[in-house]
Image (cartoon, rainbow, N blue to C red):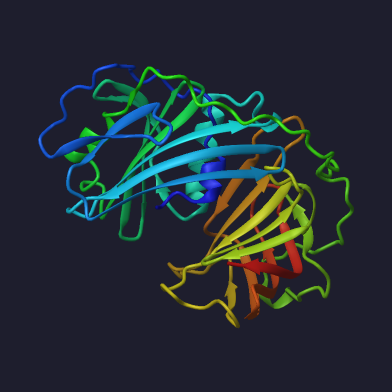
Amino acid sequence: MRWTTSVLLLSTAAVLAGDPPETKELPKPPAGWKYVESKDETYQFLFPAQTPRSGTRDRTYRSGRLSFRVQVNYCVSRDGLTFAAEALNLAGIGVKGLGAKDILKIIVDAEKMDGYDVTEPVEGTVGKLTGNQFYASKGGEARRVMLIGGRGRTYILSVAGKDKANVGGEDADTFLGSLVLTPKPAVKTEPKTPAKPEAPAPTPGTEAAAEVVWTNDLTKMAFPDKPASGKIMGADFKVASAEYVPGFLTLRQGKGFFADAQVKVALSLKPGESIGGKTFEIGPRSDDVNKPSIFLSRLMPGEKVPKNEILQTGYALKLEFGPMEKGKLTGKIYVCTPDKNKSVVAGTFEATAK
C-alpha cells in the first residue's frame, strides 16, 4: 500500500464532491470484474476477478486532538496495477472549520512533502461518480487518485502503476467509477471516553530561540553545540521532536496534530542505502540534480491549516548524521533558506529512526 500514515491523517471526512450512488441491486459487473463488499457492509466496488494478491486492513489512529478510523481493501492485478479502496472517518475538534479546499490542499502538500510530483486537482466525473482527481508520480511509480465524499466520510480510490498512461486506461476508469453505497446503517461510532486534559501547544513565537545567524556561505556555517533552533517563516523555532524515515528528516515544534512549525529535508538515497555517517553540503548555486529539497511549515495565528513552502534551489545546507543505533539517529544541521523571512535552523538533534 502506498498511502502513508501522514496522508491518511490528512484525509478528513468532509464531503469533497457529490455523494456516491446508493443501490439495492448492483449493476452487472463487466467481464473479468467482480464486486467486493467492504468489511462494514456499507459500500461495494469492483476489483479484477483474478488477482495474484489482495487484502484488507483496519486501523485506528490518534494524533493530538484528532482520531480517525480507516478501512482499506487492496489488490494487485495480473497486469501489475495496484487498486486500493479506502474509507475514512475522522473526529476531533481539530477538524472543525476545515473546508473541501483546505482538505485538498493538505493532501496535495503531503504528497509533495513525500517527494511526489502532483498535478493540480480537478473536479470531474468517472462513470456515475463525481470527485476530485489528481495524478502523483515519483521515480518509476505513478498513481491516479480520486476523492469522494459521502455519508460523513471520505472515500479514496487509487490506481498505482508504472506511468501516467498505465493508470489512465480503461481498467482504471472501471475501478474508479465503481463505488456504490449499500442501503445499510452508517458505521456506528465508538462511545466517546473522557479525554485527559492536554497541555496547550506553545503559541508560535512565544518561546525564545537562541540567535542563529542566517548566511548562504557554507564556510561561515558552524554547528551550534545545542539543540536545533532558529526562525521559520519569521517566528522563533525550537526543535521539540525529530524523526527520520528513509529519505526524510523532520524537525518539529509543537505537540498538536499540525506542528506549530517544522522543517523537513527530503534526501535522495538509493534503495536500501543507510543514512548513518553521511554528510551533505549544498550551496545556493549547486547544480546537483539529486540535491535535497527543503520543506518549511508554520501554523499561522488564527489559521487552521499550516502555511507551507517548498525550496529546491537557492538554499544553503550543512547536514551531518551520526551512526544509527537502537532506533535513534543523532546529527547536526545548519540550513538557511531564501524565503522572504530568511528562515534559518541550526544545531544538534536526536531523531527517532524507522
Q: Nearer the viewer, residue 309 or 303?
A: 303
* Residue lying at 27% horizontally and 29% vertically, measured from the top left: 177
Quadrant in the picture for the C terminus: bottom right
On the image, the x and y values in percent for residue 302 come to 75, 30
Report whether 156 appears left or right of 300.
Answer: left
Report whether 139 appears left or right of 185.
Answer: left
Q: Nearer the viewer, residue 194 or 147?
A: 194
Where residue 73 sits, quadrant-wise, is top left
On the image, the x and y values in percent for residue 282 come to 57, 71
Q: Nearer the viewer, residue 283 or 175?
A: 175
* Residue lying at 88% horizontally and 50% vertically, measured from the top left: 207
**Does residue 347 appear anywhere in the picture?**
yes
Where residue 191 sits, quadrant-wise, is top right
| Furthest residue in direction left, as rendered | 31
Where residue 277 sits, quadrant-wise, is bottom right
Q: How many marks?
A: 0
Reply above or below: 163 against 84: below
On the image, the x and y values in percent for residue 2 come to 41, 52
Q: Nearer the viewer, residue 75 or 184?
A: 184
On the image, the x and y values in percent for residue 309 come to 59, 47
Report whether 20 appears left or right of 298.
Answer: left
* Residue lying at 45% horizontally and 49% vertically, measured from the top left: 3
Reply above or below: 275 against 32: below
**Does residue 169 appear anywhere in the picture?**
no
* Residue lying at 19% horizontally and 22% vertically, measured from the top left: 27
